[in-house]
Image (tube, helix red, strand yellow):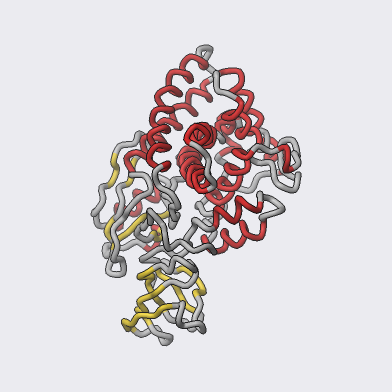
């Protein structure tokens, strides 16, 4: 892990919990929006059971919370309002693409112009933030996953692109391509796209057509250039040549495609889906590290994981001795060895003491927990 002692920007988010563990002791730490980008619940609302049930019914699985164990305020990479505006643009563009209206090109073009302005403002903001550390991305709903995921992939792609020195012009193209990378899903039958049971082999082959479908739509219905369209086609190609749709070897895959493909995999694996829960971030980081040279460009995999902290401040963790602690300080040189406030000892009795895992070599984090 590279040294991050000279970070210009540190991103600290309050912890998240599964809604199943939310109680009236938890206060909502970030606003929740509806599908029309209107505030559904404001920050500071107490999570009563009736509200929790409503959120679950709306497809939410996790929330940011503030309780007795959280000590830091949220400092978002991009404000929730700006991010929600971008999600709204992607949702509208996706709806137009799916409509099959005879004027789809004109309608898509008009809304794309508006979306570009919103995306450009995000590029401008992130371009000034060198060496951002990602500690947790925003949460997604079941129904809005594709749109929320697309904006997350855009933000992650910009952070990775900035870290490897892409210029502003390239970042603009990368951001737009990332935002549209899954537009092809709009041409996959909805009963397959939102299926809640495992896909059959035939259904999966249909789903695998989405990169080509998205590319063809952008080629025939927009005036977007190749640097935006090609990553839409290639974002599931892999370093070892075993990706799809064309099984390209590494040298034939554009750098933008490699960036988007890597962060797409990260955001997908760390998101709750109908058929599986999100994988722990440390586990996904290990997967990406191990996949450098097989699925991902090794240099990109290394650059990316150097910007991911699996244990943000306020994360509740269980140690190998059975004690429970809350992360109070990140050690920039080694993200996996933070400082903790131990709140339950090995006998699960309440306590309060500070531990620096850089000094306590015999202690390691075993797991992230939602409930103490």
Whether residue 48 is visible to the viewer of this picture, yes or no, is no
The structure residue drawn at horizontal position 33% and vertical position 54%, both measured from the top left corner, is: 52
Across the whole image, how many numbered discs are drawn on residues? 0
The answer to whether residue 365 is left or right of residue 14 is: right
Name which residue lies at 75% across and 39% down: 248
Give the x, y percent position of residue 207: 65, 37
Q: Position of residue 178 (x, y in %)?
A: 53, 37
Query: Does residue 34 sit above or below 301 in this rendering?
Result: above
Tell me the quarter of the image containing the C terminus: bottom left
The residue sitting at 67% across, 56% down in the picture is 291
Question: Residue 181: x, y in percent?
Answer: 56, 35
Image quarter of residue 177: top right
Q: Quadrant of the N terminus?
A: bottom right
Where residue 226 sits, quadrant-wise, is top right
Q: Camera-side residue: 197 or 81?
A: 81
Residue 19, compared with residue 166, is above or below; it is below
Q: What's the residue at 59%, 29% (across, down)?
A: 227
Res 338 seen here: yes
Q: Is residue 255 left or right of residue 65?
A: right
Q: Is residue 52 left or right of residue 132?
A: left
On the image, which quarter does residue 15 sit in? bottom left
Of all residues, the one furthest to the bottom in this rendering is 347
Q: Position of residue 161 (x, y in %)?
A: 52, 43
Q: In the rendered view, would you say 287 is above or below 352?
A: above
In terms of depth relative to the viewer, which is nearer, 159 or 150?
159
């Amino acid at each position: 892990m590279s040294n991050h002692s000279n970070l210009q920007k540190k991103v600290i988010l309050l912890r998240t919990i599964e809604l199943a563990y939310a109680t009236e002791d938890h206060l909502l730490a970030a606003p929740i929006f509806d599908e029309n980008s209107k505030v559904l619940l404001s920050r500071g609302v107490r999570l009563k059971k009736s509200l929790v049930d409503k959120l679950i019914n709306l497809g939410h699985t996790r929330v940011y919370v503030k309780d007795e164990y959280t000590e830091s305020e949220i400092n978002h990479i991009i404000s929730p309002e700006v991010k929600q505006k971008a999600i709204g643009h992607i949702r509208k563009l996706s709806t137009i693409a799916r409509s099959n209206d005879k004027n789809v090109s004109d309608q898509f073009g008009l809304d794309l112009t508006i979306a570009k302005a919103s995306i450009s403002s995000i590029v401008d903001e992130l371009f000034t933030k060198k060496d951002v550390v990602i500690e947790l991305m925003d949460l997604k709903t079941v129904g809005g996953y594709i749109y929320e995921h697309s904006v997350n992939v855009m933000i992650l792609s910009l952070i990775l692109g900035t870290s490897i020195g892409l210029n502003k012009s390239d970042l603009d193209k990368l951001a737009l391509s990332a935002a549209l990378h899954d537009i092809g899903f709009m041409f996959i039958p909805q009963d397959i796209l939102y299926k809640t049971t495992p896909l059959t082999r035939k259904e999966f082959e249909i789903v695998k057509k989405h990169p080509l479908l998205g590319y063809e739509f952008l080629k025939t219905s927009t005036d977007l250039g190749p640097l935006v369209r090609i990553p839409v086609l290639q974002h599931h190609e892999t370093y070892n040549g075993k990706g799809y749709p064309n099984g390209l070897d590494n040298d034939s895959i554009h750098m933008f495609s490699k960036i988007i493909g890597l962060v797409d995999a990260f955001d997908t694996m760390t998101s709750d889906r109908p058929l599986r829960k999100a994988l722990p971030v440390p586990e996904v980081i290990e997967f990406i590290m191990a996949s450098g040279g097989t699925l991902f460009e090794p240099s990109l995999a290394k650059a990316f994981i150097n910007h991911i902290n699996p244990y943000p401040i306020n994360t509740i963790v269980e140690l190998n001795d059975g004690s429970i602690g809350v992360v109070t300080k990140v050690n920039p040189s080694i993200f996996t060895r933070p400082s903790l406030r131990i709140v339950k000892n090995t006998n699960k009795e309440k306590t309060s003491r500070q531990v620096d895992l850089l000094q306590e070599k015999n202690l390691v984090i075993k797991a992230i927990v939602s409930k103490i």
